[in-house]
């Protein structure tokens, strides 16, 4: 497997299993870094880690986990838009294609760019084994992982693996110390390989309205805008960045909110 395009002019690519190769992404999501609101702590931590990566300084693989629609995936996309001209490149790999990850990494380890392997909505069910290939890239085996590759993943699960009450019941207390069951050790061992773990939580109403305000910077009647935004979020049953974006798309053409 080899790239058929020049990474100099290609910010990102995606692995396509039917062709067993990478395809350059032609239309990047244009989400801007400063357009993401309510997640300043996570933005600062990920930017700091990525800047160290670009400077060939010690840095970590990153796991962004937490509530749906809170900006995890958007943050990764905005990261590429912010840093690709500084040498950052990104390869998106679906969970079901992780078995090909060692081949992908072999093909880019000699490139003069810094690569983030991006795994969106990553989680594993009982019996799945794709995480084993991911483990080897995160920490290596006999061969160390490439210095110019890091893995950034998003997930709704903190430990990436399913957690069952029955596993906790198998844990033991010996000599006053808690010894987790083997199943629990296996569940947390993958997530432990991500040195940077950033948590995302549902927005408070204040943060949600800040996100709405950022999407409607020229609206004068903020009270009416906020009232409609709250009604929209209440109908959906969740307040987050995705809801704010959906509200914007629904209401942007309304004469009241231009």
Image: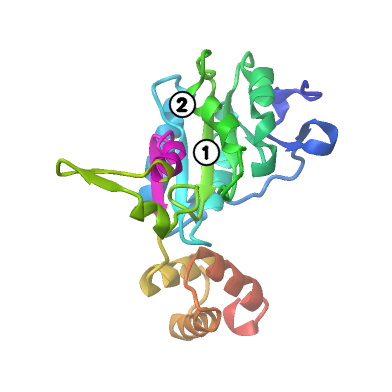
Image height check: is 87 above or below 67? above
Where is residue 151 shown, x and y percent of the image? 53, 33
**Magenta-highlighted residues:** 184-199
Q: Disc number at residue 152? A: 1
**Residue found at x 51% / y 85%:** 231
Image quadrant in which you'd find residue 180: top left
* Magenta stretch contains residue 37: no
Give the quadrant of the N terminus.
top right
Image height check: is 250 above or below 13? below
**Horizontal placement of 158 versus 180: left or right?**
right
Query: Secondary structure beneath disc 2?
Result: helix
| Mark 2 or 1, nearer chain start | 2
Q: Can I make out residue 75 in this image?
A: no
Q: CA distance from mark 2 to mark 1?
A: 12 Å
**Label 2 CA crowd tier, 10 Å (few <14, some 14–19, many 20+):** many
Please identify the residue farthest to the right as the structure is shown: 19
**Residue found at x 49% / y 82%:** 234
Tag 2 residue: 53
């Amino acid at each position: 497997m080899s790239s058929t395009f020049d990474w100099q002019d290609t910010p990102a690519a995606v692995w396509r299993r039917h062709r067993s190769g990478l395809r350059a992404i032609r239309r990047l999501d244009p989400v801007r870094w400063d357009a993401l609101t309510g997640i300043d702590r996570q933005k600062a931590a990920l930017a700091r880690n990525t800047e160290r990566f670009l400077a060939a300084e010690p840095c970590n693989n990153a796991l962004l986990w937490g509530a749906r629609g809170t900006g995890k995936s958007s943050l990764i996309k905005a990261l590429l838009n912010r840093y690709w001209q500084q040498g950052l490149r990104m390869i998106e790999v679906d969970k079901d294609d992780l078995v090909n990850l060692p081949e992908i990494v072999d093909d880019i380890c000699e490139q003069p760019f810094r690569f983030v392997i991006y795994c969106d909505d990553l989680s594993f069910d009982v019996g799945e084994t794709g995480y084993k290939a991911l483990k080897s890239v995160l920490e290596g085996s006999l061969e160390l992982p490439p210095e110019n590759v890091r893995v950034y993943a998003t997930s709704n699960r903190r430990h990436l693996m399913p957690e069952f009450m029955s596993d906790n019941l198998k844990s033991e207390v010996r000599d006053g110390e808690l010894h987790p069951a083997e199943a629990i050790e296996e569940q947390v061992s993958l997530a432990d390989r991500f040195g940077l773990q950033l948590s995302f939580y549902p927005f408070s109403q204040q943060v949600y309205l800040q996100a709405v305000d950022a999407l409607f910077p020229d609206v004068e009647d903020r009270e009416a805008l906020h009232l409609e935004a709250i009604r929209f979020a209440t109908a959906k049953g969740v307040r987050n960045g995705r809801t704010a974006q959906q509200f914007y798309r629904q209401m942007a053409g309304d004469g009241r909110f231009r």
